[in-house]
Image: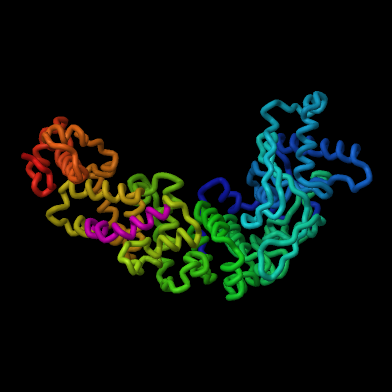
C-alpha cells in the first residue's frame, strides 16, 4: 500500500523511530517510559491514593494501577497524550475516583502534591452503553490538565448473536487479550514503573504491525467493529495490518456480523475518525482493497438498493489526495477547502461518489434524497450538514460542469458576472458549502491528464477574476420592504424572484450605491415576475 510523505510532528515520530522503539523487535515486559513532570505528579498522586486505600481497606489484594492502551502506545512512539486510561485491579473506577476527590480535600495531601483548585476537576460518570462500545461504567476526572478515565480490569465473554459481551473483573492479561490490537494492549504499571506486554505488542510496534491479540476470525466475530478499528489504527499509525487478519476482515460471515451486530452510529464514529485523521486516503484505500465498501457505505434498510460499481472509485479519492498534497496559495484545494470541517466533508463526498450514477424518485414523484445521500445518512450516520451538501452536489453538478466547460472553451458569456455570481449564491443557498460542491464535481471528472486539473484551475481563477467567490455574502442593495415601497405595491409571492433580479443587477454594477437602477430593472420585468404594478 502506498504511503504519502509525512509533514507534521506526529508523522515525523512515525517516520523516524526512537531508540526505544527500535528495541521492540524483542518482546519485553521491562521497557520503561520517560514521564513528563506533570505525568510524574499525576503518578505520585494516584499511588498515594492507592496506598491510602490499602491502609484503610484491609482483607483484599493491594491496589495496582496501570495506564493502558493508547497512552502507552503513543508515549512509546514519542507522542504526547493528554487522555489517560487508568485500569485498576481490585475496585471500580467510580470507587477509586471518589477516593481521589476525598483525599484531595485534606490539607496535608494538597500541600504534599501541590494541588491547586484548578488541578482537580469534577467527576463525570459515563454509564455503561454497549451500543457505543461502553461495556462498563467509566469515571472521568480532570487531573493536572489530563483527562483521566478510571475503570477496573475486565474480561469479556461474547455470544454468537451480539457484540455486547458479558463483562466481569479480570486480570491484566485477560484485559489485554480482550483488546482490538496488540499495540493497544500494553500497560504501564505505575507500581513498578515498567511496561507490561502480554500480547507481543512491543514487537508488533517495532515491526509497525497491527495484529489482533487472539485469533483474527474469532476476534472479529466477537466484535465486528474491530475490523474498522484496525483499519483506523493502521491508517493513523501508518502500520501494516497482519496478513492473517486481512484474510478474514472482508470474509462474508464477518461482514454479515458487522451488518447485524454493529449499530450504524458506531460504524459512523469509526469512519469519521478515519476521515478526520491525517491519512484519510489510506483509510479509504484499505476499505476498498479489503472489499468493505458495500458493507460500510450503504443504506442497510434498503435491501433492494442497487450495488454501485467501485471499479473506478480509487481515482476519486486519489485525486482528492493529490489535490491536498499539492496545496499551495491559490491552488484548487487551497481555494475550495478552508476549514477542518470542510476537509472532512470533502472526504465523505469522495466516499459516496460510487452511488452518484443512481437517481431515486419515489412512486409519488416526490423527490427523495439521492442514494449517495442515503449511503451517508444511513450507512455512517453522517450529520445533516454533510447530507445536505451531498444532495446539493448531486443536484448542481450538471450546471457546475457546464460553467467549467464554458470557461475552458472561452464561450462568449463567461464574462457575465451575474451569471456566475447568482449560480454560486444558489449553490450555497440550496445545500451550503458551495466550494465543496465544486470540488466534488471536479473529483468525479473523468480526466486524468494534467490538462484535466489545469481546466479546473482555470475555472477557479476565472471566478476569482470575476470577484464572485464571496457572492453568497453580498448584501442586498435594497430589501423587500423598500422594494415594495419603491414600486408602490404590496409584497407578494413575486418578492424572492424580484430580489434576485436586484442582486443580479448589483453583480453587473458592483460599484453602484443607489438602488434606483435595481428598482428600474425589476419594474422592467414586472409582467414576467407577476408584479401587479398599475
| Residue at the outermost right position | 59
Q: How is the image coloured?
A: rainbow
Q: Residue 253 placed where, x, y %?
A: 61, 75
Does the magenta run of residues contain 393? yes
Along the viewing direction, whichever of 454 and 229 lies nearer the viewer: 229
Along the viewing direction, whichever of 136 and 494 lies nearer the viewer: 494
Q: Main secondary structure of the magenta part?
A: helix
Along the viewing direction, whichever of 78 and 368 lies nearer the viewer: 368
Q: Does 482 sit left or right of 218 as displayed?
A: left
| Residue at the outermost bottom position | 252
Residue 375's place in the image compared with 21, above or below, is: below
Tell me if residue 240 can be seen. Answer: no
Q: Residue 444 placed where, x, y %?
A: 35, 63
Residue appearing at x 41%, y 73% in the figure: 306
Residues rendered magenta in the picture: 386-404
Residue appearing at x 70%, y 59% in the figure: 179
Q: Does 339 sit left or right of 63 as displayed?
A: left
Q: Does 109 sit left or right of 427 as displayed?
A: right
Tell me if residue 229 can be seen. Answer: yes
Q: Residue 226 placed where, x, y %?
A: 63, 63
Q: Residue 281 placed where, x, y %?
A: 48, 59
Residue appearing at x 75%, y 58% in the figure: 167
Does the magenta run of residues contain 319? no
Amino acid at each position: 500500500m502506498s504511503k504519502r510523505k509525512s509533514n507534521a510532528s506526529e508523522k515525523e515520530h512515525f517516520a523516524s523511530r526512537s531508540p526505544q522503539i527500535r528495541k521492540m523487535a524483542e518482546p519485553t515486559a521491562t521497557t520503561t517510559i520517560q514521564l513528563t513532570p506533570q505525568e510524574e505528579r499525576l503518578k505520585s498522586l494516584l499511588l498515594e491514593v492507592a496506598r491510602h486505600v490499602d491502609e484503610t481497606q484491609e482483607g483484599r489484594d493491594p491496589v495496582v494501577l496501570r495506564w493502558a492502551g493508547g497512552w502507552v502506545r503513543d508515549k512509546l512512539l514519542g507522542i504526547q497524550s493528554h487522555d489517560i486510561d487508568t485500569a485498576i485491579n481490585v475496585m471500580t473506577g467510580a470507587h477509586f475516583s471518589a477516593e481521589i476527590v476525598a483525599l484531595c480535600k485534606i490539607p496535608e495531601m494538597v500541600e504534599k502534591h501541590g494541588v491547586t483548585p484548578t488541578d482537580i476537576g469534577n467527576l463525570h460518570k459515563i454509564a455503561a452503553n454497549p451500543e457505543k462500545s461502553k461495556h462498563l461504567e467509566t469515571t472521568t476526572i480532570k487531573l493536572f490538565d489530563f483527562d483521566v478515565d478510571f475503570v477496573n480490569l475486565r474480561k469479556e465473554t461474547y455470544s454468537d448473536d451480539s457484540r455486547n459481551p458479558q463483562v466481569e473483573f479480570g486480570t491484566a492479561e485477560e484485559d489485554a487479550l480482550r483488546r482490538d490490537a496488540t499495540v493497544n494492549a500494553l500497560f504501564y504499571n505505575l507500581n513498578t514503573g515498567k511496561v507490561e506486554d502480554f500480547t507481543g505488542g512491543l514487537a508488533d510496534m517495532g515491526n509497525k504491525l497491527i495484529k489482533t491479540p487472539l485469533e483474527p476470525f474469532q476476534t472479529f466475530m466477537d466484535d465486528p467493529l474491530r475490523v474498522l478499528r484496525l483499519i483506523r489504527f493502521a491508517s493513523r499509525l501508518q502500520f501494516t495490518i497482519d496478513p492473517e487478519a486481512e484474510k478474514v476482515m472482508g470474509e462474508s460471515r464477518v461482514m454479515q456480523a458487522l451488518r447485524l451486530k454493529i449499530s450504524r452510529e458506531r460504524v459512523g464514529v469509526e469512519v469519521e475518525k478515519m476521515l478526520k485523521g491525517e491519512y484519510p486516503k489510506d483509510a479509504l484505500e484499505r476499505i476498498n482493497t479489503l472489499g468493505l465498501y458495500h458493507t460500510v457505505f450503504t443504506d442497510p434498510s434498503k435491501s433492494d438498493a442497487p450495488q454501485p460499481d467501485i471499479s473506478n472509485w480509487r481515482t476519486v479519492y486519489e485525486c482528492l489526495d493529490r489535490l491536498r498534497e499539492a496545496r499551495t496559495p491559490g491552488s484548487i484545494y487551497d481555494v475550495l477547502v478552508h476549514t477542518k470541517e470542510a476537509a472532512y466533508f470533502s472526504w465523505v463526498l469522495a466516499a459516496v461518489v460510487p452511488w452518484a450514477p443512481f437517481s431515486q424518485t419515489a412512486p409519488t414523484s416526490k423527490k427523495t434524497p439521492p442514494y449517495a445521500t442515503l449511503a451517508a445518512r444511513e450507512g455512517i450516520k453522517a450529520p445533516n450538514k454533510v447530507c445536505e451538501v451531498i444532495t446539493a452536489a448531486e443536484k448542481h453538478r450538471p450546471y457546475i460542469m457546464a460553467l467549467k466547460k464554458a470557461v475552458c472553451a472561452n464561450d462568449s458569456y463567461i464574462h457575465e458576472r451575474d451569471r456566475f455570481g447568482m449560480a454560486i449564491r444558489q449553490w450555497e443557498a440550496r445545500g451550503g458549502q458551495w466550494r465543496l460542491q465544486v470540488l466534488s464535481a471536479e473529483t468525479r471528472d473523468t480526466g486524468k491528464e494534467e490538462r484535466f486539473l489545469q481546466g479546473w484551475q482555470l475555472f477557479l481563477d476565472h471566478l476569482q477574476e470575476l470577484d464572485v467567490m464571496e457572492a453568497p455574502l453580498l448584501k442586498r442593495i435594497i430589501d423587500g420592504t423598500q422594494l415594495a415601497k419603491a414600486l408602490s405595491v404590496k409584497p407578494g409571492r413575486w418578492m424572492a424572484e424580484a430580489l434576485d433580479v436586484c442582486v443580479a443587477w448589483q453583480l453587473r454594477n458592483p460599484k453602484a450605491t443607489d438602488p434606483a437602477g435595481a428598482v428600474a430593472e425589476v419594474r422592467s420585468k414586472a409582467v414576467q415576475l407577476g408584479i401587479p404594478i398599475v
